[in-house]
Image (spheres, rainbow, N blue to C red):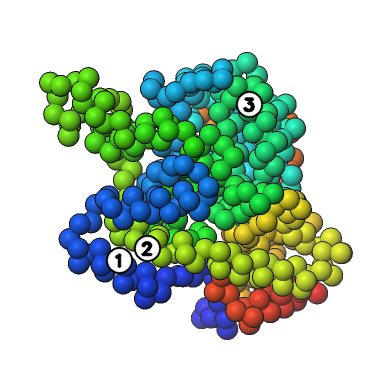
């Protein structure tokens, strides 16, 4: 007979209340369900929160990455300051420690990902490693703010500007994180966010791309929906230049159907008002775990994720490094057996995943940091609804394993 753990501590729980449910019901009652006014309202509120001019909502964080990539690869992409489109054979610098759909769109656009290592304790890419990976074929830098922390993005933006490169921030794991009191996601030319169930806020499924560039934002509105002009601010200009084509079905580029629904946006509008409170709870939980694991950390048994002093984090989970793969595997199995849900630290070193055998890619450096995280790291939850009993149970369980 399989034993049932006496307590279960999930990675995440449903943070929606009757307020979100009522907002979704109001959409259903309205009879207007596809992308419309609520989506535009959520885009405006989200842009205001991040501190950017434009936010383009889509149906997932992965779609946000896809939209950003194929906008930078589009023949209509505005080019200045020496930047060039992402194209077949061009190189894009990416983190080795990342989620798969940060990298897949670049491969799908014909570019060559160049993997760069992370600091295994902060989990973030380092600016000097990024700069060392730049070649004459580099067209863009894609950074990922990992698990509620942040890359030194002002330093990376300076590198991108010096070399005439696009800077894309994948911020799907770090919504609400600040670097020197500025929202991450507001430093790059484009940035993506995710509103999947398990993220900092949820719209069930959903994502966003933000930018300060008017032309990029308008092009994304076309690429998001079939390549037509219907949702573009410049739609009238294209219609006037093509008077023989019905402007409702006027296509100026290739595109996808990445549109969200009004239900997603209505939930997002409510969740966005709760984001700062959720993130403060995540920080409080992480501080309690830090305090409770201090002796094990001093022994080197578990090394929790650390944050740069300029970063105001929003812990997406609680990652730790163990001394060996065997010790990590043992801890993971012990926690899972006790009902404490764990995960690997995203994809680990993505360059080691079998999918990469089929696609051209390059590696800059030895990726020892990402390898260490992949082999010796795991994380458990810091969801904002976690209670004191859950925190103590985690600490007791980790302590008992090492005892």
Give SS at disc 3. Answer: helix
Q: Which residue corresponds to mark 2? A: 267
Name the residue carrying label 1. Answer: 24
Q: Which mark is in front, 3 or 1?
A: 3
- Vertical side of 323 occupied by 171: above or below: above
Residue at 30% across, 35% down: 232
**Residue 347 drawn at (x, y percent):** 58, 47
Q: Is residue 11 above or below residue 323?
A: below
**Residue 244 appears in the picture as rendered:** yes
Q: Which residue does the image show at 58% across and 64% down from the upper left? A: 279
Q: Residue at x 56, y 68 (%)?
A: 277
Q: Quadrant of residue 22?
A: bottom left
In this rendering, the count of numbered labels is 3
10 Å neighbourhood of mark 2: few (<14), some, or many (≥20)?
many
Q: Which residue is mark 3?
A: 161
Which image quadrant is residue 168 in? top right
The CA distance from mark 3 to mark 2 is: 37 Å
């Amino acid at each position: 007979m399989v034993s049932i753990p006496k307590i279960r501590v999930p990675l995440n729980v449903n943070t929606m209340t009757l307020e979100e449910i009522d907002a979704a019901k109001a959409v259903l009652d309205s009879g207007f369900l596809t992308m419309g006014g609520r989506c535009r309202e959520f885009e405006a509120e989200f842009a205001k929160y991040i501190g950017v001019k434009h936010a383009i909502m889509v149906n997932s964080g992965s779609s946000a990455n896809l939209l950003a990539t194929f906008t930078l690869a589009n023949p209509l992409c505005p080019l200045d300051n020496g930047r060039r489109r992402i194209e077949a054979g061009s190189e894009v610098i990416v983190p080795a420690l990342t989620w798969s759909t940060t990298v897949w769109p670049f491969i799908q656009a014909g570019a060559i990902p160049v993997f760069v290592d992370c600091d295994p304790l902060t989990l973030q890419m380092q600016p000097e490693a990024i700069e060392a990976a730049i070649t004459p074929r580099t067209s863009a830098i894609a950074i990922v703010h990992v698990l509620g922390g942040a890359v030194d993005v002002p330093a990376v933006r300076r590198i991108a500007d010096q070399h005439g490169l696009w800077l894309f921030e994948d911020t799907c794991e770090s919504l609400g994180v600040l670097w020197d009191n500025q929202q991450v996601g507001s430093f790059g030319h484009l940035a993506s966010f995710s509103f999947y169930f398990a993220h900092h806020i949820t719209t069930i499924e959903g994502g966003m791309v933000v930018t300060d560039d008017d032309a990029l934002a308008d092009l994304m509105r076309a690429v998001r929906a079939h390549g037509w002009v219907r949702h573009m601010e410049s739609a009238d200009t294209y219609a006037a230049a093509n008077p023989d084509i019905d402007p409702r079905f006027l296509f100026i580029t290739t595109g996808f159907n990445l549109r969200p629904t009004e239900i997603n946006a209505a939930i997002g509008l409510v969740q966005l008002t709760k984001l700062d409170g959720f993130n403060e709870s995540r920080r409080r939980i992480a501080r309690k775990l830090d305090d409770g694991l201090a002796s094990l950390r001093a022994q080197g048994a578990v090394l929790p994720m650390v944050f740069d002093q300029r970063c105001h984090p929003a812990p997406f989970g609680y990652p730790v490094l163990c001394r060996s793969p065997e010790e990590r595997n043992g801890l993971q199995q012990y926690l899972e057996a006790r009902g404490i849900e764990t995960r690997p630290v995203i994809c680990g070193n993505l360059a080691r995943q079998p999918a990469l055998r089929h696609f051209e890619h390059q590696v800059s450096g030895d990726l020892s940091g990402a390898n260490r995280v992949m082999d010796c790291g795991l994380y458990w939850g810091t969801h904002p609804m976690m209670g004191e009993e859950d925190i103590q149970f985690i600490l007791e369980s980790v302590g008992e394993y090492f005892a």
